[in-house]
Image (tube, coloured by chain):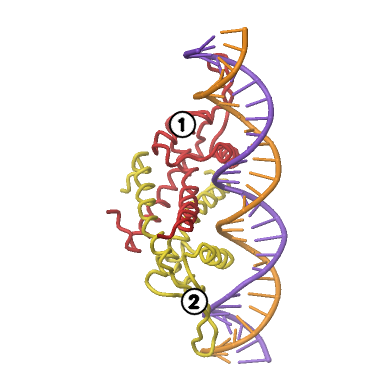
Chain colours: A yellow, B red, C orange, D purple
DNA sequence: TCACCATACCTCGGACCTCGATGTATTACT
DNA sequence: AGTAATACATCGAGGTCCGAGGTATGGTGA
């Protein structure tokens, strides 16, 4: 019907929507237990059936940024003689994560107001 | 407790979350009726009680981008001898907007899986 | 009348984000 | 020995968001 143009627009808007959720999801994962980058990526795949997975470049940038903001901290571990960089949520990270829940429900309400009822 | 660092982190993460929703909300507004930029901004203010309002710079960039993707079209109108640039959703825009509803409910489900129940 | 504010449009630079490509290593299998 | 999966990281291109600044018109009140 609209061909390529539609796919391009959808890709762009989906990307915008998803991008905002990456940090939140990472913090949610790390609240359960410390994880290393590659494992976080696999957790995204599992959670979303491969539909919501940041690229590797994005993921490592994101982790660096979260660390800069002191929402996570990192340490090197070794399993099977192999070095892995683990990330752990900080107390500040947990606090921020909790506040972001309000933000998400605020946004949900905005969409309800717009008539975007979820089924 | 955490002082400035917490405010900075919250600001950043809130911004990321909100940013992804701007295009969707604009398309939702325009689905009702054509509007000009300034009115769109006021509609954001009203919808969110001033909490979810893109800056002017952002808004005009966004409208330009939506037009580039042929999701909206623009035309100049005049009211009271004053020129206004109106934006109108295109058929492609309506189509894309509908598909994005699935995306949003997909993301909502992801957060439910993570235990982020809405109250 | 004239200052001032709200309305209305726009551009620009800086900071930041996402992606895909690329690079480096190690481990596991075949 | 070769390949795939694991694991980390960097880089440049393109794009987004914001704040600051600019231009201009219309209405209000002193």
Task: Give residue B27's position: percent from left, percent from top.
Answer: 47, 38
Say what secondary structure mark 2 lies in: strand
- Vertical comparison of B113 with B25: above or below: below
Q: Is residue B104 visible?
A: yes
Task: Give residue A19's position: percent from left, percent from top.
Answer: 50, 56
The residue lying toward the viewer, choosing from B114 and B75, is B114
Task: Give residue B67's position: percent from left, percent from top.
Answer: 58, 38
* Cα gap from disc 2 to disc 1, whole angstroms: 45 Å
Residue at x 52% of width, y 29% of height: B38
Query: Could you confirm whether marks 2 and 1 are on the same chain?
Result: no
Extreme residue in the left direction: B119
| Label 2 Cα neighbours within 10 Å, binned few <14 / some 14-19 / many ≥20 | many
Say what secondary structure mark 1 lies in: helix
Which labelled disc corresponds to residue B42? 1
Task: Give residue A24's position: percent from left, percent from top.
Answer: 43, 60
Give the letter of the chain under mark 1: B
- Vertical comparison of A6 with A51: above or below: above
Residue at x 36% of width, y 47% of height: A106
The residue lying toward the viewer, choosing from D20 and B50, is D20
Q: Can residue A48 be seen in this view?
A: no
Q: Are marks 2 and 1 in contact (CB under 8 Å)?
A: no
The residue lying toward the viewer, choosing from D3 and C13, is C13
| Label 1 Cα neighbours within 10 Å, binned few <14 / some 14-19 / many ≥20 | few
Query: In the rendered image, which residue does mark 2 sit on?
Result: A86
């Amino acid at each position: 019907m609209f061909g390529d143009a539609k796919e391009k627009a959808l890709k762009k808007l989906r990307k915008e929507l998803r991008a905002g959720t990456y940090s939140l999801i990472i913090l949610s994962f790390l609240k359960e237990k410390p994880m290393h980058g590659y494992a976080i990526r696999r957790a995204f795949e599992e959670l979303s059936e491969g539909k919501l997975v940041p690229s590797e470049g994005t993921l490592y940038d994101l982790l660096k940024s979260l660390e800069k903001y002191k929402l996570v901290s990192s340490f090197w571990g070794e399993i099977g003689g192999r070095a892995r960089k683990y990330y752990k949520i900080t107390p500040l990270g947990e606090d921020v994560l909790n506040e972001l829940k309000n933000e998400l429900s605020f946004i949900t309400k905005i969409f309800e107001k717009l008539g975007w009822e979820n089924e």
